[in-house]
Image (spheres, helix red, strand yellow):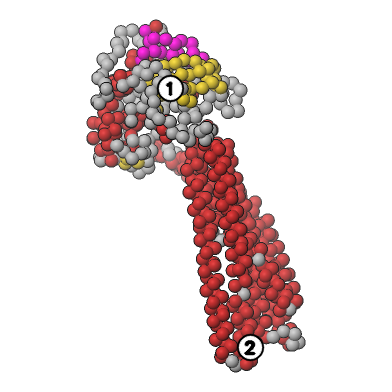
């Protein structure tokens, strides 16, 4: 039985959680030893003051130096090992989940019409940054703080009492700071995200903004929103700085308190003078995790939220598809009683569609706007799952088909042609390692080879952000070449002539005829009837139903009188 992608995602989540828990337990054990070794310096100072100074024994001093050096060397090694543990945890997590998260995010974007890919990858990187950061160690350090407290109580119960009260005060101030700043910080961050999103969205229409003098009005609007965000940030900063000053002052007072306690105890000859200095250092080390407890806990909460989002994405949005590649094949395309209703809607867009196409047939799909033509196109290429029924190519379900091998079988040109950031060559080759022969073959089929040759760097011309700007017709012709790359067996073209001139439309018809001669199934969706002359069959959709289906000459109103099919081109070079 073939393993499905959602089962693989569940296994990855389990493995990631197990690796994290195992690594954290190992780091906790290391932290226990590291915290004990951090007593090296204060105990060294205690022994030097009480033993070496009083006895004036250099041998004792040398022995203490050797022991302290060994302890600190061991501390250095274990602290480095703990850091490497966190790094390995983060690396394993990202390596295992990076690709599944991206695939699930793309599927979620397709299903819901919202791009979630960037957010999902950011959350995964946030998890990695948390694991390799300092916040992950805060609760582990606090967990072993009783070690320091026990030592202080061992020196004298008053030292322990002062340290315990100090820890409670520091933790209370941290909680108060979080309570007073959390809501304002959240509002400020949300406002900042909205402002950035609005500015980014507006800058996509820079030409219209500049041409119609919209910049002053937009600038006033952005400035107003920015000032509101800044006011929220100022409130948060003032509160945070005030409480930070109070906390810092309290720490100084606590140092004075423990030293004063030690002085009284020394005067009363209840402890040695060395314990006074040692207790001050030990208490400072004990309070350290409590000082950063709230901020560390906040980062823990954010990391757990990011992990929950990633987990939900993998469990709920990962497409239930096969992961075993299917060999390249050629056979009949069958659409069997397909019904599709968008998520959250009870009204189907497509209602019981059934038809079949054989290799070498070209189907033209016509119908009014909103009839479901583009929805049908997405079902045919396996992007969208039918509510009921199925789409099968040579008996294989196109939605369940493993994506990499399915990509070798299918070519798709959507209504809105989206070329990716990269070279013309890499775009035509679908971002794979480009086979120059196949790239040239696809570009010649789409009759775009000469157009590409006139670009600044030909096939190596960079397009995308900061790259060469293509016209709408050029983008559509290059998109067609990408759809034809590798001689796919099923080609779906959605409004492929919307930006083409007469020459471009003739080239499109020649390309379709060539692919038909090569034995491909071609499905053509178009409003302009002129390109329908190349179709063998015509299907008319209205309100999600097939109202007409049959040979082109038998369907009225699609081909205008006097039009003749273009001459068939020869088979592809090398085709037998």
Residue 116, placed above or below residue 398: below
- The image quarter containing residue 10 is top right
Residue in the image at 38% along x and 31% along y: 408
Q: Is residue 529 visible?
A: yes
- Residue 326 placement (x, y as % from top left): 43, 31
Q: Which residue is mark 1?
A: 394
User: Magenta part of the protein: which range?
Assistant: 535-553
Depth check, front residue: 223 or 194: 194
Residue 22, numbered label: none
Q: Which residue is mark 2?
A: 51
Q: Quadrant of the C terminus?
A: top left
Residue 310, placed above or below residue 41: above
Q: Is residue 110 visible?
A: no
Q: Relative to residue 453, is residue 246 drawn left or right?
A: right
Residue in the image at 63% along x and 79% along y: 43
Q: Nearer the viewer, mark 1 or mark 2?
A: 1
Residue 79, placed above or below residue 128: below
Please say whether residue 547 is one of the residues in the magenta stretch: yes
Depth check, front residue: 442 or 264: 442
Furthest-front residue in this view = 1
Residue in the image at 25% along x and 40% along y: 456
Depth check, front residue: 59 or 469: 59
Q: Secondary structure at mark 1?
A: loop
- The image quarter containing residue 457 is top left
Q: Relative to residue 364, is residue 229 drawn left or right?
A: right
Mark 1 in CB contact with mark 2 (< 8 angstroms): no
Please say whether residue 83 is one of the residues in the magenta stretch: no
- Residue 20 placement (x, y as % from top left): 57, 53
Mark 1 or 2 closer to N-term?
2
- Residue 340 placement (x, y as % from top left): 54, 22
- Figure label count: 2
């Amino acid at each position: 039985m073939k393993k499905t992608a959602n089962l693989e995602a569940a296994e990855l989540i389990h493995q990631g959680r197990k690796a994290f828990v195992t690594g954290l337990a190992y780091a906790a054990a290391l932290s226990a030893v590291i915290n004990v070794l951090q007593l090296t310096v204060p105990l060294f100072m205690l022994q030097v003051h009480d033993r070496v100074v009083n006895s004036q024994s250099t041998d004792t001093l040398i022995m203490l130096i050797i022991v302290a050096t060994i302890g600190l060397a061991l501390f250095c090694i274990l602290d480095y090992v703990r850091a490497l543990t966190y790094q390995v945890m983060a690396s394993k997590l990202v390596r295992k989940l990076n690709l599944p998260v991206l695939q699930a995010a793309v599927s979620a974007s397709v299903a819901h019409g919202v791009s979630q890919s960037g957010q999902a990858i950011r959350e995964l990187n946030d998890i990695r940054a948390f694991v390799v950061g300092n916040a992950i160690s805060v609760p582990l350090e606090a967990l072993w703080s009783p070690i320091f407290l026990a030592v202080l109580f061992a020196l004298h119960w008053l030292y322990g009492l002062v340290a315990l009260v100090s820890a409670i005060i520091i933790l209370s101030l941290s909680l108060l700071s979080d309570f007073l700043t959390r809501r304002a910080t959240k509002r400020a961050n949300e406002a900042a995200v909205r402002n950035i999103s609005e500015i980014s969205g507006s800058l996509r229409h820079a030409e219209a903004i500049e041409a119609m003098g919209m910049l002053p009005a937009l600038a006033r609007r952005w400035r107003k929103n920015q000032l509101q965000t800044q006011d929220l940030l100022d409130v948060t900063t003032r509160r945070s700085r005030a409480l930070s000053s109070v906390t810092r002052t309290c720490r100084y007072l606590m140092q004075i308190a423990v030293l004063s306690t030690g002085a009284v105890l020394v005067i009363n000859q209840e402890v040695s003078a060395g314990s006074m200095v040692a207790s001050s250092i030990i208490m400072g080390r004990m309070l350290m995790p409590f000082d950063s407890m709230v901020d560390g806990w906040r980062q823990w909460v954010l990391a757990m939220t990011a992990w929950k989002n990633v987990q939900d994405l993998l469990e709920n949005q990962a497409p239930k598809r096969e992961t075993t590649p299917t060999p390249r094949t050629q056979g009949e395309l069958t659409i069997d009683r397909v019904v599709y209703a968008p998520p959250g809607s009870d009204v189907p867009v497509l209602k019981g569609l059934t038809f079949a196409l054989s290799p070498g047939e070209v189907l033209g799909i016509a119908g009014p706007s909103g009839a479901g033509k583009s929805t049908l196109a997405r079902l045919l290429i396996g992007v969208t799952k039918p509510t009921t029924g199925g789409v099968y190519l040579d008996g294989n379900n196109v939605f369940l088909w493993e994506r990499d091998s399915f990509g070798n079988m299918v070519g798709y040109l959507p209504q809105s042609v989206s070329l990716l950031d990269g070279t013309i060559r890499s775009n035509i080759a679908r971002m794979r390692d480009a086979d120059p022969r196949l790239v040239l073959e696809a570009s010649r089929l789409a009759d775009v080879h000469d157009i590409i040759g006139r670009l600044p760097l030909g096939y190596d011309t960079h397009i995308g952000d900061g790259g060469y700007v293509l016209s709408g017709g050029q983008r559509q012709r290059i998109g067609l070449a990408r759809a034809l790359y590798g001689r796919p067996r099923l080609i779906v073209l959605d409004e492929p002539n919307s930006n083409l001139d007469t020459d471009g439309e003739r080239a499109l018809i020649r390309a379709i005829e060539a692919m038909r001669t090569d034995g491909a199934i071609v499905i053509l969706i178009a409003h302009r009837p002129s390109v329908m002359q190349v179709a063998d069959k015509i299907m008319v959709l209205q309100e999600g139903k097939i109202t007409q289906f049959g040979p082109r000459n038998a369907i009225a109103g699609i081909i205008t009188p006097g039009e003749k099919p273009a001459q068939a081109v020869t088979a592809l070079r090398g085709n037998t």
